[in-house]
Structure formats: structure tokens, C-alpha cells
């Protein structure tokens, strides 16, 4: 009984085996596990001052009492302060010290996961407790809180889901909506919901923090509530603009980073790039060029982006060995809330990737855009957190003033709203067009999202939630993925689909070794061992089943170029989703070796993302006519022939052609040999996974990773 320990001793991931012989994977693989060690100070500021002295040095400390008074007198307060003034780390503690936690938790939302986790860690240290005790965090598929928790950091998506179960948020005495100027989709929906909650609960305090000039708009939205300004900033940051526009921001960033590094000035470097591909190229270039220089001082280059496994993300917070400078290359995930002790230099390329709903494709596409002035100021702010800093902007001052928007367009106005619609419907909001949004989404986007939910069977002809829709809300997944899980129960393959869905919920399962060509060959042969030629989804299933047969061994993962930590996360996600299925009385059955059923099931949920072969290697979406190509890393790519119909899962657009060998994009595909039906027989249709590539800014090529139907 139970899972045997393997020779590498990690079949249980170090977790205790329960009495029933089963390992509880739900709590495995937490970010907190990678950040167990106490943070080590890097900057003079952090080294020389005690934590209490550091807290008292912050601008917010000077106005602590005034702030608490205004919160006491008002249900809703907008707090505005410069970056680094202490909003995120101090407000929660002040409320705790002032007694608010005696009758509920103080919750603080963050738009990004890594911010929620790292800030919780810092605050737990300032309070002198272990992370997960008094101070905890919760993000999707990871709850690091306990009964003792009184200060809870979380992503805004978590609070939104909590409001489903407890519409008045009774567990909370105060909610801080941090980084409200980011205007994430979930934040905007929470604005509307929390406004109502506060009017029902006079004992709940709502604090909205912002670093920008949006404060008047926020105050007006909540009913002319007071705005509190925190005066002053922690440390000055020198802003240096580029004199001429840069043609190649990667090249410019590499040069700038090396110049700083070789100048002899002390302090770590943080470079902002739009996405993973640019980060990889920048990191490689810096390392290569340093190798060419004789007697150059050592430099640790650390990438961070959302698809990176959490143990590698946690590395940016660890202190580099003495005398070695850190150079972090990040997307805008490091832009807000984070403090990486020791960063003195910021290099800002001026671009970011934004999710934008493309009505032609009928779904969100990630595209590169210039950042806004608000983003630029946040980025610069990262350099002045624990000492005076410098920010090198790789764009001209005139571009900053004349070409950049003041603030980014709120996510709610540019993305797919299917999840939001589902959530609001289940909260009983009948007419979504009348819901109180700060900036209402375009009506077309809303109607398109409702249409998607209707074809998935979540809404009926009158726009009300169906029983399937109600069940879909229970899962913290995209509507089509929840639908796939629900359909799989009727089709007798729920255990298999559960694995596929879990695999899809975790970034970067495979990695490809770089540089060593002998390894490359080995890699391809090894990959062929579990590749299912007609489907990336089935390839995923196969990988998981083989890993399981090998006692969840990490040695097996290494031999097969698979991230062990990502696989453990998959196992944990699977456990959590399984709990929900059991709770909802959904039966778990496997279809055994008859994998055609699985392909049918995938089609039943993703039929709206189906494409038809058009020319050599080119597909067009059957509904929208959008062209796309199979991604070179897809199992289908090497199949020898191109199937007539495919279904896809995801769409990616980039500005650079990247060597497929060096990217670890997820390629999930499914190909099915079933009949391809038209949209009127939607239930039987199938789908694909698509990646769109833009080889240069002038041309757009779509690549899709697919599931073949036919
Ligand atoms: N991990 C850390 N190590 C060292 N100092 C830290 C750390 N976290 C926070 N600090 C200190 O606390 C200060 C305030 O951080 P906090 O995150 O509360 O600021 P903020 O006002 O929320 O800024 P932002 O608007 O950028 O989110 C930082 O400027 C820094 O001096
Ligand atoms: Mg903050």
C-alpha cells in the first residue's frame, strides 16, 4: 500500500505518508518551500538597520496615526504614495497593531502571484513569525495560510473566488486592494463587488492603494471617499533617458548592463524586457559577452517570468555570493510591489506584453506594446527601495512624454471576459451590461464572451446560468477546461482528462538542454519515447502516466528532460481538482487504452477552436478564417503528414522568430481521427493549440500547435 520510496528517495516529494498510505500532494511544491531560508540582507540599508529601524525609516511611518484615524472614520479610503513608501508591507501591519485582526483577517490583494508570495514573506519576517502562520498568502492552487493567519496576501483572483462562497466576505475585517492602478481584470470586478459589500457591512474597511494620479477617479467611483497622500519617498532615483531611439532594445540593454557592471559601481541590476524570448536572448548575450572579456568580474544572471518554475523564480530573492553582482532580467512581473534587496540599477526597455482580445481570432493574444508612463515610473521605483538608484530608460524623453499613454488601458477593456461573466452570473448579476464597472468593457467583448459561454452550454438562450455553467464555476479554470472535465465524466475518461487539465495548468513541463549538440540528439530521441504523434495532449497524459509508473522519480524526469518540480506541481494541482470533483459527486473513471475517447472529449470542449488545413502547413480557423501554423515543437509537427482538421488550446503571438530548440513553449495538441462536425453539431467538434509568431514587426505568422480531428 502507499507509494514506495524510490532509490532517489523522493517519490513523496519529502511529504509524510498518511495512515491510508497516501501522500497528501495538495500542499506539495509551494513557493514558500523555496523561500524557507531567512532573507539575507544585501544593501547597506538592510544590513545596518534592524527590521524595526527599517520600518520606522519609511515615509508611511511618519503619518501612521493620521492614517489610522482616517481609516477609523471612513469605510473606504484611497491611499496614494510614492513607490517604496511602505503601502504594501506596512498598512496590513498597522491595521493588525490597531486591533482590526481581533474580529477578522486583514486581506491584501495583489495583481501578481510572485508579489503576493514575496511580500507575505517579508511581512512575516518583520512580524517575527513563520510564513503561513500569522502572515500567509494564497494564490491559485497554493494556499499557504493556517488557522493562525491574520494577515493574508493573495491575488485578486483568489478574493474574487472567495466572494463566491461568502458574498459578504465575513472572514475579513479589512481589505486592502493594492496596486489598484494596475487595473487588472479581477481588480476591476472586485471594485464593483466590494462597493456593494461595504454598503452592506458597516464594520468592513476597504483601502485602495495606488501610486498614480488615478486617485480622483477611484474616489469618485466609491462615492467621493477621502484620499490620503503619504508624503515623501524612500530613496532618490536618477532617471537617464536614451538620447536617440534604440533600434534593438535587446542589444541596447545588454550593452547598458555590461557598462554598469564594468564601471565598478556597486549594486545589482534589474532589466525589464517584454517577454520570455527576449529575456532568454538578453541573458545569453550578457553571459557570452562577459566570457569574451578577460578578467571581467563575475556576474550572476537570473531570469524571471511567469512561466518559470517557482523554485527558479524564488532565486532572484536570494543573495548572490559575496562580491558577485546579480543581474535580474524580468518581465513586468517584477514591476510592482516587489522589493529585491540590493537592486540599484534598473534598465528599462520600454515594452511589455499585454493580453488583448482579438475579435478576429475570437480570443486573447499576447502582444508586445510600449509601456505606459505609469509602468515606467513603477519600473524606475524598483531602483530606489533600499538605497539611492539609477534608472536607464532605453527610449527618449520625448517618446516618454509624447508617445506613451499616461496609464495602461484597463484589462477589462481589452480581454476576454468569459470567466468574469460566469462568475458574475453565478453571483446573481442578471444584466451584466448594468453592472457597476469603473470603466465598462466594450459591449462587443461582453457579448462575444457570453456567446462563447453559450456555445459551451454554460448559459441558456435567455442568458441564465445552466446547471453545467454552475458546475463550471466551481473550478478555478478557464471555462473550456472546466467544460472538458465535466464532459469527460459522461464520456468515461474523467481520470485521464483530469491529468491533462492539470498538465495544462502548470507552465513549462519540458526543457531542452542548450548548446551541447550531443545532448540535443539524445533529447530528441528521448522525447520520441513518449510523444504521441497525433496529439500533444495525449503526449502530456503519456508523460504523466510514465512518471507515475516510475514512482514519481526525479531521476526519471532528469533523464527525460522534464522539470521535476513542474511535475510535482501537476500532481498537486491534480489532487486539488480531484477534491473538487469528489465534492461535486463527479465520477472518476479512466478509459484505459482507448485514447480516441479522450480526443473526442477534448473536441467536445474546444470545438470552437478548430482549424482546417488550407495550404502547405497552413491552417485556418473554421469559424473566423484566421490563418495559423503548427508550432515546430508540437508532436504533430513531425508526424509526416498534416491532418485535415485540428483543434487548439492556446494562442501566442511574438515579435521574434525564435529557435524552437531554445524555447520551451508549451505545445499541446490533440489530434483526433474522429469526424469533424460543423458548429451546429458543436458537441462533437474538436480543437487545437496555437502559437502565433511574428517574425518581424512587419509580418505576422501564426503557428499553431494542434490536435488533429478528422
Ligand atoms: N524584502 C525586502 N528587503 C529589504 N527591504 C525591503 C523588503 N521589502 C520591503 N522593504 C523595504 O520596505 C519598503 C517599502 O516596501 P513596500 O513594498 O511596502 O512599498 P510600497 O509603498 O508598497 O511600494 P510600491 O508602490 O512600489 O508597491 C521598501 O522600499 C524597502 O525599503
Ligand atoms: Mg506596494
Image: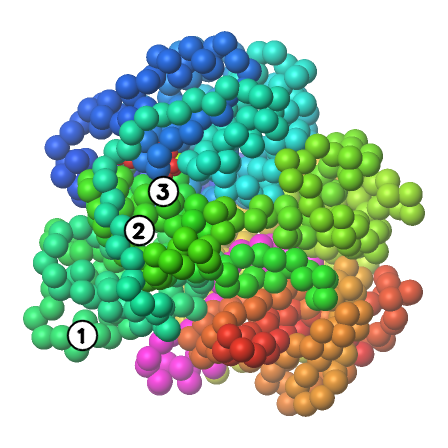
- Residue 512 percent across, percent down from the top left: 42, 73
Residue 46: percent from the left, percent from the top? 19, 35
Q: Which range is magenta?
A: 497-524
Circle 1 residue: 291
Upstream in sequence: badge 1 or badge 2: 1
Residue drawn at 76 percent across, 48 percent down: 443
CA distance separating discs 2 and 3: 11 Å
Q: Is residue 45 above or below residue 445?
A: above
Measuring 35% from the left and 34% from the top, which residue is drawn there?
82
Q: Is residue 475 left or right of residue 136?
A: right
Q: Earlier in the sequence, mark 2 or mark 3?
A: 2
SS for dot 3: loop
Mark 2 near mark 3, Cβ–Cβ under 8 Å? no
Tell me residue 598's x, y (percent): 74, 65
Q: Label 2 crowding class (10 Å Cα cut-off): few <14, some 14-19, many 20+?
A: many
Count neighbours of disc 1 (C-alpha within 10 A) and say few if under 14, some if 14 to 19, many if 20 or more. few
In this rendering, position of residue 285 left or right of residue 7:
left
Q: Circle 2 is placed at which residue position? A: 316
Q: Is residue 487 above or below residue 178?
A: below
Residue 338 tag number: 3
Asked where in the image residue 170 lies, by quadrant, the reply is: top right
- Identity of the residue drawn at 32% across and 43% down: 381
Magenta-colored stretch includes residue 522? yes
Mark 1 and mark 3: Cα distance apart in space:
30 Å
Q: Nearer the viewer, residue 63 or 578?
A: 63
Regarding residue 658, the answer to whether it shows in the image is yes
- Camera-near label (1 vs 3) is 3
Ligand 1 within 8 Å of disc 3? The answer is yes
Mark 1 → mark 2, Cα distance in angstroms: 22 Å
Query: Which of the 4 image quarters holds residue 40?
Result: top left
Q: Is residue 412 left or right of residue 426?
A: left
Amino acid at each position: 500500500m502507499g507509494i514506495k520510496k524510490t532509490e532517489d528517495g523522493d517519490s513523496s516529494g519529502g511529504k509524510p505518508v498518511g495512515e491510508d498510505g497516501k501522500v497528501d500532494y495538495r500542499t506539495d511544491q509551494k513557493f514558500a518551500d523555496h523561500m524557507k531560508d531567512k532573507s539575507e540582507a544585501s544593501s547597506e540599508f538592510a544590513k545596518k538597520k534592524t527590521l524595526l529601524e527599517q520600518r520606522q525609516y519609511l515615509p508611511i511611518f511618519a503619518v501612521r496615526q493620521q492614517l489610522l484615524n482616517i481609516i477609523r472614520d471612513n469605510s473606504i479610503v484611497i491611499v496614494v504614495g510614492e513607490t517604496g513608501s511602505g503601502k504594501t508591507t506596512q498598512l496590513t501591519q498597522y491595521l493588525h497593531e490597531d486591533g482590526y485582526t481581533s474580529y477578522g483577517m486583514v486581506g491584501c490583494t495583489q495583481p501578481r502571484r510572485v508579489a503576493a508570495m514575496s511580500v507575505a514573506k517579508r511581512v512575516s519576517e518583520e512580524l517575527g513569525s513563520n510564513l503561513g502562520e500569522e502572515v500567509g498568502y494564497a494564490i491559485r492552487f497554493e494556499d499557504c495560510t493556517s488557522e493562525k493567519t491574520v494577515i493574508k496576501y493573495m491575488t485578486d483572483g483568489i478574493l474574487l473566488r472567495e466572494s463566491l462562497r461568502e458574498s459578504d466576505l465575513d472572514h475579513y475585517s479589512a481589505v486592502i486592494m493594492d496596486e489598484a492602478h494596475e487595473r487588472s481584470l479581477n481588480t476591476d470586478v472586485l471594485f464593483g463587488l466590494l462597493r456593494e459589500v461595504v454598503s452592506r457591512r458597516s464594520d468592513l474597511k476597504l483601502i485602495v492603494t495606488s501610486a498614480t494620479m488615478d486617485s480622483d477617479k477611484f474616489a469618485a467611483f466609491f462615492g467621493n471617499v477621502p484620499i490620503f497622500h503619504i508624503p515623501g519617498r524612500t530613496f532618490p532615483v536618477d532617471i537617464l533617458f536614451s538620447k536617440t531611439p534604440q533600434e534593438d532594445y535587446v542589444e541596447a540593454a545588454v550593452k547598458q548592463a555590461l557598462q554598469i557592471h564594468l564601471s565598478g559601481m556597486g549594486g545589482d541590476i534589474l532589466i525589464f524586457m517584454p517577454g520570455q524570448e527576449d529575456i532568454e536572448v538578453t541573458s545569453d548575450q550578457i553571459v557570452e559577452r562577459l566570457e569574451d572579456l578577460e578578467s571581467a568580474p563575475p556576474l550572476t544572471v537570473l531570469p524571471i517570468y511567469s512561466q518559470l518554475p517557482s523554485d527558479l523564480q524564488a532565486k532572484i530573492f536570494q543573495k548572490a555570493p559575496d562580491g558577485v553582482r546579480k543581474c535580474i532580467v524580468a518581465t513586468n512581473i517584477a514591476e510592482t510591489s516587489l522589493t529585491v534587496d540590493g537592486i540599484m540599477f534598473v534598465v528599462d526597455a520600454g515594452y511589455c506584453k499585454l493580453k488583448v482580445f482579438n475579435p478576429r481570432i475570437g480570443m486573447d493574444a499576447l502582444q508586445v506594446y510600449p509601456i505606459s508612463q505609469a509602468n515606467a515610473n513603477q519600473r524606475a521605483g524598483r531602483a530606489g527601495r533600499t538605497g539611492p538608484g539609477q534608472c536607464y530608460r532605453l527610449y527618449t524623453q520625448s517618446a516618454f512624454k509624447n508617445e506613451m499613454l499616461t496609464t495602461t488601458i484597463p484589462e477589462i477593456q481589452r480581454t476576454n471576459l468569459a470567466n468574469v461573466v460566469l462568475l458574475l452570473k453565478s453571483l446573481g448579476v442578471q444584466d451584466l451590461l448594468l453592472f457597476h464597472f469603473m470603466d465598462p468593457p466594450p459591449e462587443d467583448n461582453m457579448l462575444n464572451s457570453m456567446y462563447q459561454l453559450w456555445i459551451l452550454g454554460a448559459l441558456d438562450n435567455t442568458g441564465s446560468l445552466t446547471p453545467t455553467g454552475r458546475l463550471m464555476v466551481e473550478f478555478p479554470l478557464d471555462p473550456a477546461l472546466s467544460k472538458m472535465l465535466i464532459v469527460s465524466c459522461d464520456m468515461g475518461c474523467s481520470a485521464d482528462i483530469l491529468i491533462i487539465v492539470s498538465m495544462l495548468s502548470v507552465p513549462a513541463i519540458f526543457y531542452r538542454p542548450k548548446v551541447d549538440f550531443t545532448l540535443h540528439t539524445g533529447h530528441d530521441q528521448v522525447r520520441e519515447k513518449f510523444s504521441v504523434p497525433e496529439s500533444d495532449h495525449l503526449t502530456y497524459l503519456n508523460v504523466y502516466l510514465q512518471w507515475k509508473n516510475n514512482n514519481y522519480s526525479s531521476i526519471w524526469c532528469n533523464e527525460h528532460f522534464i522539470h521535476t518540480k513542474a511535475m510535482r506541481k501537476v500532481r498537486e494541482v491534480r489532487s486539488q481538482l480531484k477534491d473538487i470533483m469528489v465534492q461535486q459527486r463527479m465520477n472518476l473513471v479512466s478509459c484505459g487504452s482507448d485514447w480516441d475517447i479522450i480526443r473526442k472529449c477534448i473536441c467536445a470542449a474546444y470545438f470552437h477552436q478548430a482549424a482546417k488545413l488550407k495550404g502547405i502547413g497552413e491552417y485556418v480557423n473554421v469559424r473566423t478564417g484566421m490563418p495559423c501554423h503548427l508550432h515546430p515543437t508540437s508532436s504533430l509537427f513531425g508526424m509526416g503528414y498534416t491532418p485535415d482538421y485540428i483543434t487548439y488550446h492556446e494562442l501566442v503571438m511574438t515579435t521574434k522568430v525564435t529557435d524552437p530548440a531554445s524555447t520551451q513553449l508549451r505545445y499541446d495538441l490533440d489530434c483526433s481521427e474522429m469526424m469533424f462536425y460543423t458548429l451546429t453539431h458543436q458537441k462533437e467538434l474538436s480543437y487545437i493549440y496555437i502559437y502565433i509568431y511574428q517574425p518581424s514587426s512587419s509580418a505576422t505568422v501564426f503557428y499553431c500547435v494542434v490536435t488533429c480531428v478528422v
